[in-house]
Amino acid sequence: MIKVDKNKYMIKKHGKMKCDVVVYVNDYLYKLLMEENEAVNQLYNAACLPGVYKRVLGMPDIHTGFGLPIGGVMAMDGENGVVSAGAVGMDINCGVRLLSTNIHRSEVNESILKALLKEIESKVPPGLGKKSRDKKFRNVNLDRIAELGAQEIVRTYGLGTEEDLQNTEDYGRIPGGDLDAVSPHAVERGDQIGTIGSGNHFIEIGYISRVYDESLADFFGLKEKNITVLIHTGSRGFGHQICTDYTNMMLRKAESMKLPIPSKGLAYVPIKTELGRQYLAAMAAAANFAFANRQIITDYVRSSFSKIFRRSWEKLGLKLVYDVAHNIAKFEEYDGKSF
């Protein structure tokens, strides 16, 4: 990697690479990245995939993933390119949503904070493999969740508002989700909806320590010293199983088609193959599961705050600021083409 600008490094196209690799990190992060350079190798491998367009990118949060590193971004020719389950990742639509409040930091002492956390944990079980504590979600209609995502939770279960959907990426639904493309084993793990999981997933109660842009903060309803809630989780075992299933299928298919695979984690098939289409349908199902999961957890958080503060969540100002996904693949128009 060579430094080409402030906070910008590059691996220029060479050998089997189809495009350049560009990484956006400062000098401090660059040193850390070089200590863990498997993430850079994953970017290099991604640049060798057929149909990859213009350049493969690494964002400042880059760290090793399954196929593509976390913080890795690439565009693929929508007609002649390939799709890789490992590039999307194990935790499909692992994402983050932020809730604002009108609760000042001074209103939350240690005892209130402990009570809040205890109440939230009573509703949202953390940890590996945990199932929903709410019986209605242990036998949820996964067909509708896979197709409709957070829209199903808001419009059928009444958990949340239309404003929540407006402030969620893609209105909480990626089109094309189909449970028929999902294995029975993955379906069995669908009872984890409404749970946070393990690893780097969390529900964080924080506060806004400083506002740098008053007008932008006002637009989003964010005020200095007010409490916020950050929710970070994804599609749980449901999405993990989908990635595992399709990575194995893609490995076998690539071998039969004699496709050159840069690494097991980047096993791929052409997008236009039947397996490619099936994976995208399964991936959308998992992404929609994750949107629904975060919407359910939002309702649990809101009800917990209402119970502890003895006011409705609306009066407490627990509004959704944003819900943004990562670990997904989407079709988008760019330079007059589909990617």
Image (spheres, rainbow, N blue to C red):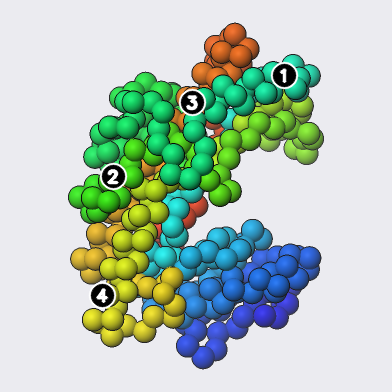
Tell me whether the residue at label 3 lies in contact with that at label 2, contact meaning CB atoms closer than 8 angstroms: no
Give the amino acid at mark 2.
Glu
Badge 4: residue crowd in 10 Å (few <14, some 14–19, many ≥20): some
What is the quadrant of residue 330 in the picture? bottom left
Secondary structure at badge 2 equals helix
Does residue 12 lie above or below 129 as drawn? below
**Residue for badge 4:** 253
Residue depth check, mark 4 versus mark 1: number of the one nearer the observer: 1
Q: Which mark is residue 188?
A: 2
Badge 2: residue crowd in 10 Å (few <14, some 14–19, many ≥20): some
Name the residue nearer the viewer: 26 or 38: 38
Give the amino acid at mark 1.
Ser
Residue sitting at x 31%, y 63%:
246
Secondary structure at badge 1 equals helix
Whole-number angstrom distance, CA of label 4 to CA of label 1: 57 Å
**Residue for badge 1:** 111
Whole-number angstrom distance, CA of label 4 to CA of label 3: 42 Å
Tell me whether the residue at label 1 lies in contact with that at label 2, contact meaning CB atoms closer than 8 angstroms: no
Mark 4 / mark 1, whichever is N-terminal: 1
- Residue 299: x %, y % from top left: 47, 24
